[in-house]
Image (cartoon, helix red, strand yellow):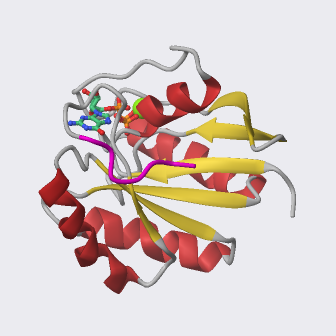
Amino acid sequence: MGNIVAIVGRPNVGKSTLFNRLIERREAITDPTAGTTRDRHYGKSEWNGILYSVIDTGGYIRGTDDVFEAEIRKQVRLAIDEADTILFMVDVNGGVTSADETIAELLRRSKKPVLLAANKVDTHERQYLTADFYHSALARCMPSQRPAARAPATCSMS
Ligand SMILES: Nc1nc2c(ncn2[C@@H]2O[C@H](COP(=O)(O)OP(=O)(O)OP(=O)(O)O)[C@@H](O)[C@H]2O)c(=O)[nH]1
Ligand SMILES: [Mg+2]
């Protein structure tokens, strides 16, 4: 298997926040406004002595006429094609959305290995919300949260 990981998910789930954490620099813009990332961003990271490339992508929104959103979809598909492994990021708050289902289907069709990262698990109790995501049957579900979140991390990317 090669060493390119693409972070994919709907807008605002925390993809760029994780990307910055992995590359250990604040390179990607992160913001509470959905649709912040539009292009693909590339970075390098290392895990247990293994170097890998990571791609941050824009939030995937299905079938709108918006030209920007269509361009983001194109960029996401390019990143999926290029990647060896996909990190599918969801937000545990609010459960599985139809946007998550659409992306799950896109990823299933890619036939690439997918890891599901359930983000924004900021409190101990919220780790149980990850159970909702098992039914998308993509992969193991890994709870995560940004480093600054107050509650103890239950699990992280590594
Ligand atoms: N509570 C909480 N907020 C988070 C966490 N991770 C990211 N955020 C916040 O969620 C918002 C969106 O984060 P981004 O990293 O910009 O999300 P994104 O998925 O890249 O968004 P788009 O580029 O619009 O698709 C920001 O305000 C982040 O600070 C987390 O673990 N917990
Ligand atoms: Mg982003």
Q: Give the mark count.
A: 0
Q: Quadrant of the N terminus?
A: bottom right
- Overall secondary structure of the magenta section: loop
Left or right for 92, reference 113? left
Please report the residue visible at 36 percent of the width from the left and 38 percent of the height from the top: 14
Q: Nearer the viewer, residue 139 or 152?
A: 152
Residue 78: horizontal and vertical position, in percent? 68, 50
Residue most extreme to the top: 26
List x then y, in percent, for residue 143.
Answer: 36, 57
Q: Position of residue 135 (x, y in %)?
A: 33, 85
For residue 130, what is the image quadrant? bottom left
Residue at x-position 68% and y-position 49%: 5
Q: Is residue 39 visible?
A: no
Residue 154 vs residue 132, the one in the foreground: 154
Is 145 rendered above or below residue 36? below
Q: Whereabouts is ligand 2, in terms of quadrant?
A: top left
Expressed as whole percent of the image width and height from the top left, the position of residue 140 reads 49, 74
Residue at screen point 51% across, 76% down: 139
As drawn, 26 above or below 152: above
Q: Is residue 26 visible?
A: yes
In the displayed structure image, the side of residue 144 where residue 75 appears, left or right: right
Is residue 56 on the magenta stretch?
no
Image: magenta residue range: 152-158
Query: In the image, is 39 to the left or to the right of 117?
Result: right
Q: Is residue 124 left or right of residue 49?
A: left
